[in-house]
Image (tube, rainbow, N blue to C red):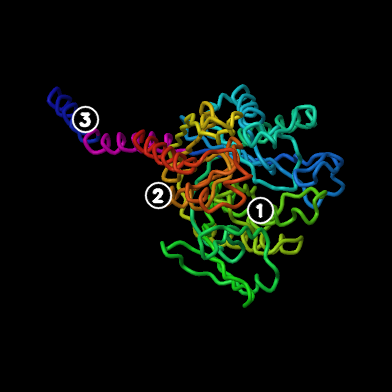
Amino acid sequence: MRKYIVAESAICVWLVLLILHIFCPATAQAGTEASLDARAVLKGGCAKVNITPPLGIPLIGSKGQPSDAILDELYAKALVLNDGNNTIAIVSADLLYTPLEEITNPVRRIIKEKTDIPERNVLVCATHTHSGPEVFTRSKLKPKDEVSDSEIDNFYLQTLIKKLASSALIAHKNMQEVKIGAAKGHVPEILYNRRPKNADGSVTMAFTLPPEVAATRKIEAGPEGDTRVTFELADEQEQLDFGPIDPEVCVLRVQDANGHIVASLVNFGCHPVSIYPHLSTSISADYPAYAAQVVQQAEGGICLFALGLAGDTVPVRRGLKPCQQIGKALGGEALRRLQLVTTTSEVTLQALKRQIRFPTKKAPSPDPNTADDGAQEYVATEMQILKLGNIYILGLPGEVLVEVGLQIKKRAALENLFVVTLSNDSIGYVCHSKAYEEGGYEPASATNLAKGAGEIMIKEALELLNQIKRNM
């Protein structure tokens, strides 16, 4: 009997060892995979808040006249993502600017206080509508453009700051499991570079084009492989050399577990001046509103707009109807690209920002007998990068000329690089050095930044991109 008990015990031990041998590795592997899945869960939320000012508030383009009509509502839209370790937030507002000290930092502080999202992880950008409220002191632009605090509707400004922050707070509260992905499209037909050159290399500004000239539009490759939209002038006029544009439409898709869009982001570079200055006292988000509407009506979710390289590019045609057409064309291209985006939840989020300075133009010496123009002064601002897996969102302050931004894109050589201008601050036009020699509006009367500002931006942007890649 004892032999049977011993034998039975031995068999039981053998079976236990066999089970452990067979099943433990699988169990351990399953546990490891579960742990990886837990770490890989990405959450995201999106929200929008109406920021339309009351009628009567002056608009950017109204020259002090009270607003008297609302063509479409203005919104603050926020996207918040969390990978389990880090949380980032993008707030896009239908405003001309989001100055660092006046809007961006106060918004960041509220978000940090309520959600604990680090301020360096929050990007606040303006869609750059010229048909929005005048609520900026313009302290970093040319001295003659500065506006005193007494001229600003501070009650609306404080409400505006809280609403921008609220969009992120609501998005943060509504987070769910998501997947993200990015894609690129092109829509060169709707814009052109407004700094065409004469035969001698000087610039003749072309803010608008006569209908008969606009009708001659051609899309061509430039000498460096860039895209150019060119036009034929009347025979008696000297033909102009139209510069490059950035036709890229970069789109970000954020979808839920069922594949439905929670949020999308469209990044494109063209001045939102379809409404301005034709209806200077009408409130409007301009063509980005119609682009977002196309995406939202077809796919649902909330569509954010982030301005790309728009410093010297404008719509081919202006007016209410062209505004709708441009917006629908952009929205249609974004919608097309959003359909086949490959998405993933295995995303690690990172964020960096750095302080930078740009030299300003020196004021003429008060003493005509001396060449000393005084000490060099600087504009202090910041640059930011958000990394969403293999997607990079580069936030640049100011209105960046296409030539500057294209150099960043070319030299960064990243497949999914979103360059978002007018991010976090307003410092005026950022021009490449050659623009100062060519003349024209942007490097002359429209910026207080000294020659070399564009090259500083390129250098700093590439260093910041390299820094975040090293931190992987």
229 and 351: which one is in front?
A: 229
12 is higher (above) or lower (below) than 236? above
Asked whether the viewer can see residue 74, the reply is yes
Residue at numbered disc 2: 414
Point out the tag, 3 or 1, that comes first from the N-terminus. 3
Check disc 1 and report its element: helix, strand or loop: helix
Q: Is residue 33 magenta?
A: yes
Image quarter in which the N terminus is found:
top left
Q: Position of residue 34 (x, y in %)?
A: 39, 36
Is 358 contained in the magenta span?
A: no
Q: Position of residue 372 (x, y in %)?
A: 51, 29
The residue that disc 1 covers is: 292
**Which residue extends farthest left?**
3
> Which numbered marker is on residue 12?
3
Say which of marks 3 and 2 sits in front.
Answer: 2
Residue type indicated by callout 3: Cys
Type of amino acid at the residue the image marks with label 1: Ala
Dominant SS in magenta: helix
Give the quadrant of the C terminus. Answer: top left
Q: CA distance from mark 1 to mark 2?
A: 26 Å
Kind of residue at disc 2: Leu
Comes first in the chain, label 3 or label 2: 3
Residue that appears at 59% across and 56% down = 313
Q: Percent position (x, y) of residue 464?
A: 42, 36
Residue nearest the observer in this picture, 347 or 128: 128
> Which residue is painted at 70% across and 31% down in the image?
161
